[in-house]
Image: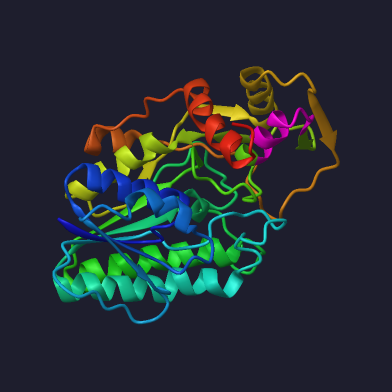
Amino acid sequence: MRVLITGAAGFLGSHLCERLLQEGHSVIGMDNFVTGSPDNLAHLTNNPRFEFIRHDVSNFIFVPGKVDAVMHFASPASPNPASPFGYVNLPIQTMKAGALGTHNTLGVARAQNARYLLASTSEIYGDPEEHPQKETYWGHCDPTGIRSVYDEAKRFAEALTTAYHRYHGIDTRIVRIFNTYGPRMRQDDGRVVPNFIQQALRGEPLTIYGEGKQTRSFCFVSDLIEGIYRLLLSDEHMPVNIGNPSELSILEFARTINEIIGNKAGITHMPTLRVQHDPEMRQPDITRAKEILKWNPEVSLDEGIRKTVPYFQRKMGLA
């Protein structure tokens, strides 16, 4: 296939480009570098089956030649208000990527009669009252809260994608992505994985806000990409959760990072700095992914962190 991937220079987009090329497909990467980095694609530039177009997906998209699949991954994704690249600080761009970007990429799929895959998110469940979260759960979201620019953009994108499938007959898919980590995460992302790893590598105490009882489920990037690739090749049109259901508290996660890296500085607790409606619990129910895609995450947290640490060592000049 010849596949258009938006957000190609981002953390997930760049891994997706790499995987599709490895599978023998041709890839057109598209990004405007607001949150993505050219460094993430540098190793692909000499591949004859890889093309790159610098473009903002909120504007009309034209791709010369035949396109067999469109994968829409363009959007700021970090919820951290301390990060200049977080969606809280890029609210209009985030809404445009979810609304106009989805409309424009669906337009490409319709014009080309191409299959379409939308990168949605577990954030559409909001601060969930159901645990773990199934695809049938409608969510618990505040449409005007500080996180709404991302949550509602993705909820709208799902609705628009489904409407194009029902009304225009577009061959669509929707993946709901849960917390993912691995090489190529931004150093200044502001989320817990890069923060903890970099603090540990500097020999500093890991900073936890509050008691660290809030829980997350971390999926290594290669597992996520495998699930997304299987979904692309499937005939499933309704949303599918892709994530690792192994849930642990932030405190447990911090202890794991310190143990793997050998950081003796321990952990420091700071007063709670909770972003409005930051979910206390997040865990995917992956029953549908198992049944429909025959997919199950394979990389343990210990193995995944050990695969991620060398990337941050290089970025920090420690290797």
Residue drawn at point x = 66 percent, y = 53 percent: 80
Picture quadrant of residue 148: bottom right
Q: Is residue 170 above or below residue 127?
A: below
Q: Is residue 203 magenta?
A: yes
Residue drawn at point x = 46 percent, y = 22 percent: 300
On the image, the x and y values in percent for residue 44 come to 33, 51
On the image, the x and y values in percent for residue 200 come to 70, 29
**Horizontal relation, residue 245 to residue 313: left or right:** left
Of residues 178 and 75, the one drawn nearer to the viewer in this rendering:
75
On the image, the x and y values in percent for residue 254 come to 68, 27
Q: Is residue 10 visible?
A: no
Residue drawn at point x = 60 percent, y = 63 percent: 87
Of residues 299 and 53, the one drawn nearer to the viewer in this rendering:
53
Q: Is residue 309 above or below residue 64?
A: above
Q: Is residue 38 visible?
A: yes
Quarter containing the N terminus: bottom left
Q: Is residue 259 above or below residue 60?
A: above
Q: Which residues are magenta?
A: 195-206
Colour scheme: rainbow
Quarter containing the C terminus: top right
Residue drawn at point x = 83 percent, y = 30 percent: 268
Q: Which residue is situated farthest in the bottom direction here?
A: 60
Of residues 118 and 220, the one drawn nearer to the viewer in this rendering:
220
On the image, the x and y values in percent for residue 274 come to 74, 48
**Horizontal relation, residue 46 to residue 84: left or right:** left
**Horizontal relation, residue 283 to residue 228: left or right:** right
Q: Is residue 313 magenta?
A: no
